[in-house]
Image (tube, grey):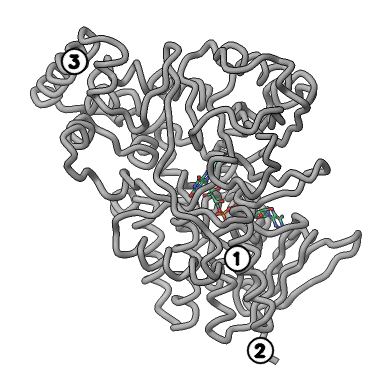
Amino acid sequence: MVEPVVVIGAGPAGISAAWQLAKRGIPVEVIEQDSVVGGLAKTISHRTGLRYDYGPHTFHIRETESSRRVVSEVQSLLNGQYRLLDRGTRLYLKGKYFVYPPEMSEAVRKVSLGLGLRIGWDYMYAALRYALNPAKHEDSFEDWGVRNLGRTLYDTFFGLYSEKVWGISMSQVSSRQAHRVAKLNLKNIILRMFKFKADPETYFIQYFYPHSGIGNLYQRMAQEVQSLGGTVHLNATATRIETDGQKVRAVAFEQAGRERVIFCQGLVSTLPLSVVTPMFARVLSPTTLEMAEKLDYCSLILVYLVINRPRVTDYHWCYLIEPKFRCNRFSEQKNVSPELLPEDKTVLCFEASCRHEDNLWRTTDADLGRMAIKDLVQMGILRPENVEEHFVTRIRHAYPIYRLGFERVLCALLSELHQVRNFYTIGRHGLFMNNSMDDNVEMGMRLAAHIAEREAREIWWQSVLRWTQLEGVAAS
Ligand SMILES: Cc1cc2nc3c(=O)[nH]c(=O)nc-3n(C[C@H](O)[C@H](O)[C@H](O)COP(=O)(O)OP(=O)(O)OC[C@H]3O[C@@H](n4cnc5c(N)ncnc54)[C@H](O)[C@@H]3O)c2cc1C
């Protein structure tokens, strides 16, 4: 009997890999600790009958060839049961909503001409200063922001907000964070002001969203895996990896209090690197295990407020820039998919980031509810009596933190793990990347093709370096 490829984690990366492996006739078994598939992008049924996502989750459509390929393949699973949406993101600042990514004309109109002039002046000053004196040390997010946006635009729209999200000074965060999340610069903002196209990877303007929740996309993939002969084990926690030399031999998981072991031809993991690396303790050096511990994560608390109104805003989500708001952003899922909620109610989801060790992580649900209601009331859009009830979800590993110098640690760790010949680590936490669902689906699909076509392992390593942008680090 041919041994299966085992995939740990049925989030977008893992379940896409499993779907594409099964499609290519390769036996596959997926181990997922949750009771549903979808990972961070799952859709949950609440006891009240409401269905909700883990924070706002829309599938980005970018103006690139690879994005078009991925989008068309995944949409084919949904039989037309999805809608296309234009980006509906806002920033809330000084009592006003601003389009995101920011538009200069709106900033000038809604704040002041003085602000517009200061933004322009600061940008020219920064551009000249950095041209005469290029950065010699490692670039932080703050250095990058001031250089590309000018001090005023950076401080007003990005600096304060980013410190609230990451909980550390942005002078301690690598500029890699800016490249991944925003890739913004004043040139792009001005191009958009005059209706020219900007960077196609950053300025995705369309999303798609399945009528019955984003998690439905990943459920469809799981159904395909099963109909093609694969297995998806739910409520199953991977606990142990057995190795034979530099090769994975088997994976153990716990389900309903029992341990089961699957012998496998290959292993795909989407676990956080800090979780999977210790499972290789027998083949990796203590230094490698220490490296994994250095990778740091931001956690996230989601507070859902059930509101006794049909709708509160017209936006998908809105960033709360000022520090007076404890939450980073809120979203209104009804504006993405009205089907998920009753007509007379809406749900606002408030997100607050923190560290796993923080007091906020241990705060009671009742106090977290009060915290979100306080932000809502401060915005002046609703009164506390409009909130019928609330519920809370906590995500331990939400965002990898790109501390200055993380690239060297990550590159060394990945290259050690790459020595295990039939092991692949992919996905947001598997490669320590602040990336999106579409990136992870593409990665899963690419890995399945690599395994099926028996490509040389070096080809896979080059893809990993390209995705993680570590080519330069690996070469040095
Ligand atoms: C609040 C928020 C909003 C977001 N919004 C968007 C958006 O609008 N658009 C977008 O494109 N992206 C968005 N993202 C990013 C997106 O959610 C991720 O990029 C994507 O889900 C990552 O997929 P993944 O498969 O790599 O990892 P995950 O989704 O984290 O999946 C990993 C899976 O592994 C499972 N697992 C963990 N440990 C074990 C174990 N020991 N045994 C078995 N299984 C295990 C987990 O239960 C999980 O199902 C958002 C992220 C967050 C946090």
The residue that label 3 is drawn on is 122
Viewer-nearest residue: 306 or 392: 306
The answer to the question of whether label 1 and label 3 lie on touching residues, with beta carbons closer than 8 A, is no
At a point 54% along the width and 10% down the height, the residue shown is 324
The residue that label 1 is drawn on is 15
**Percent x, y of residue 367:** 76, 18
Query: Residue flagged by tag 1: what amino acid is it?
Result: Ile
Q: In the rendered view, would you say 61 is above or below 446?
A: above
At a point 43% along the width and 73% down the height, the residue shown is 457
Crowd class of label 3 (few under 14; some 14 to 19; many from 20; radius 10 Å): some
Which residue is situated farthest in the top direction here?
Answer: 114
How much space separates mark 3 and mark 2, taking CA atoms? 64 Å
**Percent x, y of residue 340:** 66, 48
Crowd class of label 2 (few under 14; some 14 to 19; many from 20; radius 10 Å): few
Q: Is mark 1 within 8 Å of ligand 1?
A: yes
The answer to the question of whether label 1 and label 2 lie on touching residues, with beta carbons closer than 8 A, is no
Viewer-nearest residue: 454 or 475: 454
In what quadrant of the picture does the N terminus appear?
Answer: bottom right
How much space separates mark 1 and mark 2, taking CA atoms? 20 Å
User: Which is closer to the viewer, label 1 or label 2?
Assistant: 1
**Percent x, y of residue 246:** 58, 70
In screen coordinates, is 148 left or right of 15?
left
**Percent x, y of residue 297:** 57, 37
User: Which is closer to the viewer, label 3 or label 2?
Assistant: 3
At a point 65% along the width and 69% down the height, the residue shown is 222
How much space separates mark 1 and mark 3, taking CA atoms? 47 Å
The residue that label 2 is drawn on is 2
Q: Is residue 448 visible?
A: yes
Q: Earlier in the sequence, mark 1 or mark 3?
A: 1
Query: Residue flagged by tag 3: what amino acid is it?
Result: Asp
